[in-house]
Image (tube, grey):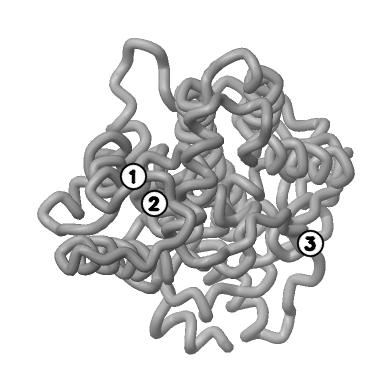
Amino acid sequence: MSYLNFRDSPWKRENTHPIYKDSSFAMNPAPEYANSEVLLASLYRTIGFPTVSEGIVPQNGRDLDKSIYSQRDKKHSSFKNTTIDLDTWITVLHGILESPKLPNQSSKRFLQVTPLIPQFAIFSGSARLSSNSWPAGSLIRRMVWLGSENSASAEALWKDLYIALSVNEDDDIFARWLEEETKCWTSKNEWKYIQPSIAEVGVLDYKDISEIDFLPARVFVKDLKAIINAKNLVTRRQWTSLLEAILRIGAVAHVIWLCDFQSRTWAILNDALNKKESIKENLKEELFPTQPQYMSYGGKALNSLKDKISSYLAARLGINNLLWSLEEIDKPFKGSIDNVWHSPNSVDIQ
């Protein structure tokens, strides 16, 4: 990788500068279109299905659908230990629990059910109907670590979320029946806690995080704890609906905050470049938004969100171009860009 590679194809992931890519404030994974049900389904896979990747979900759904209809037409079932017949199970999947498709998928035929239980995430809830779908659950995982006080508390919350997402004896009878019934109709995929690696969650100096006045990930973590505690007070469907709501709102706020942060970072760097001076000593107030108006109640959010995303794209190009340019002149930046507001003198671009 080099500046020439970046210049020729600046949007390719492999041409992103390693320092930028490894930052905890980087947009990782790169978000795409997804509704709240896709977020929850991907979260199931990220936290508890080590052998189920995003890319194989659509094919799993096609295989299950094909098998069910084929055996119904032959009036023969190879599925064992089921409590209902093929026609009834088809009604459950394509009627009772079928969920709306994404706008870009509305004309296509595939299996799409509401992510009421973990087992449904094996064959439903992919952001794309191809093998290169983006892992929306990974975004939620990074939010948990970024919004927690330390790595230990983040891991404890992640484990609590896994337990809450599991179907256990405290769940309502419909959820328990669905979980056991679905296992009879699908291939064996063990629901098992996945321990994240440091590279997957990002690591920050938590003293730095405590100095940030507004952090959507921190609000998300607080809300997530409240939702987990409320699980036994409502039905499984009510609980997953509440969880979907905070996943959707929290993820959007987090992504737009990252866009805002990177835009502010590039503005300061660009200002330093144009004025031929070192970066200012006190950066915290200029870098971190303290009173954001991303989604004001009663207001129109779409245009302002589009502006933030456009600013992020310009900032991504600018920051990567600067980092590669420093490499090109043999004056590479050394260190992390996560906490430059604490050590502004470490970034001198005179």
Please name the residue that numbered disc 3 is placed on.
198
Query: CA–CA distance between discs 3 and 1?
Result: 33 Å
> Comparing marks 2 and 3, which lies closer to the viewer?
2
Image position, residue 228 (x, y; %): 67, 26
In front here: 19 or 233?
Answer: 233
The reply to whether dot 3 and dot 1 touch (C-beta < 8 Å) is no
In front here: 149 or 287?
Answer: 149
At 83% from the left and 55% from the top, the residue drawn is 345
Q: Residue 160: tell me if it is visible.
A: yes
Q: Give the side of residue 126 with respect to residue 200, left or right.
A: left
Image position, residue 63 (x, y; %): 32, 69
Q: Which of the two labelled residues, at mark 3 and mark 1, occupies the earlier sequence position?
A: 1
Question: In what quadrant of the picture does the C terminus appear?
Answer: bottom right
Q: Which of the two labelled residues, at mark 2 and mark 3, occupies the earlier sequence position?
A: 2
The numbered disc on residue 113 is 1
> Comparing marks 3 and 1, which lies closer to the viewer?
1
The amino acid sitting under disc 2 is Gly
Q: Give the side of residue 279 with respect to residue 15, left or right.
A: right
The reply to whether dot 2 and dot 3 touch (C-beta < 8 Å) is no
Q: The residue tagged with tag 2: helix, strand or loop?
A: loop
Question: In what quadrant of the picture does the N terminus appear?
Answer: bottom right
The amino acid sitting under disc 3 is Ile
Q: Is residue 214 above or below residue 39?
A: above
Q: The residue tagged with tag 1: helix, strand or loop?
A: loop
In front here: 117 or 252?
Answer: 117
Image position, residue 88 (x, y; %): 27, 43
The numbered disc on residue 125 is 2
Image position, residue 150 (x, y; %): 86, 41
